[in-house]
Image: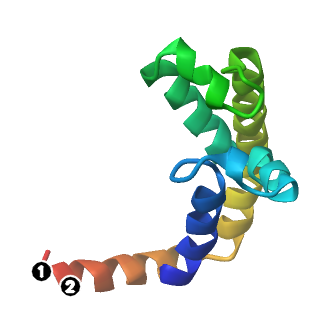
Amino acid sequence: MGLIMLPIVGLVAISGIFYPISGMPGWLQAVAQVFPIYWLGLGMRSVFLPDSLAAVELHHSWMHLTTCGVLGAWAIAGLAIAPMILRRMARRESGSVVAARRERAMARVGG
């Protein structure tokens, strides 16, 4: 699980959640803006912080429409890709394998 979380922690680190993104190199700012974590953080800051703090952001604005557009695009992409990935995962698993795994898990928890 730790190796799976490593890329996510890296994205959070460069997304401006813990450290202002304006203090990072330009190429790293561009990479951070590709992923939805930056836009989620920007949206949350726009909700909880006063309007005067928008001057600290990269474009000196909360960019509400852009935030909605980017997050909407990520949502649409996720909804389009998810059925294909789930179908591919289901093809690799037979019902007996899933049942056996469930029985092992239930035996571990004492159920």
Please rate how many residues cluster around mark 1, counting C-alpha atoms within 10 Å: few if below 14, some from 14 to 19, many from 20.
Answer: few
For residue 12, what is the image quadrant?
bottom right
Please rate how many residues cluster around mark 2, counting C-alpha atoms within 10 Å: few if below 14, some from 14 to 19, many from 20.
Answer: few
Residue found 66% across the figure and 36% down from its top = 39
The x, y position of residue 24, in whole percent, is 73, 56
Q: In front: 46, or 97? A: 46
Vertical placement of 6 versus 47: above or below? Answer: below
Residue found 21% across the figure and 85% down from its top = 108
The x, y position of residue 109, in whole percent, is 17, 79
Q: In front: 95, or 74? A: 74
Q: Are marks 1 and 2 in contact (CB under 8 Å)?
A: yes
Residue found 64% across the figure and 51% down from its top = 15
In the rendered image, which residue does mark 2 sit on? Answer: 107
The x, y position of residue 28, in whole percent, is 80, 58
Amino acid type, label 2: Ala
Q: Considering the numbered disc 2 on the image, is that residue within a helix, a strand or a loop?
A: helix
Q: In front: 74, or 43? A: 43
The answer to whether 76 appears left or right of 96 in the picture is right
Vertical placement of 47 versus 10: above or below? Answer: above
In the rendered image, which residue does mark 1 sit on? Answer: 110
Q: In front: 40, or 75? A: 40
Amino acid type, label 1: Gly
The answer to whether 34 appears left or right of 1 in the picture is right
Vertical placement of 47 versus 81: above or below? Answer: above
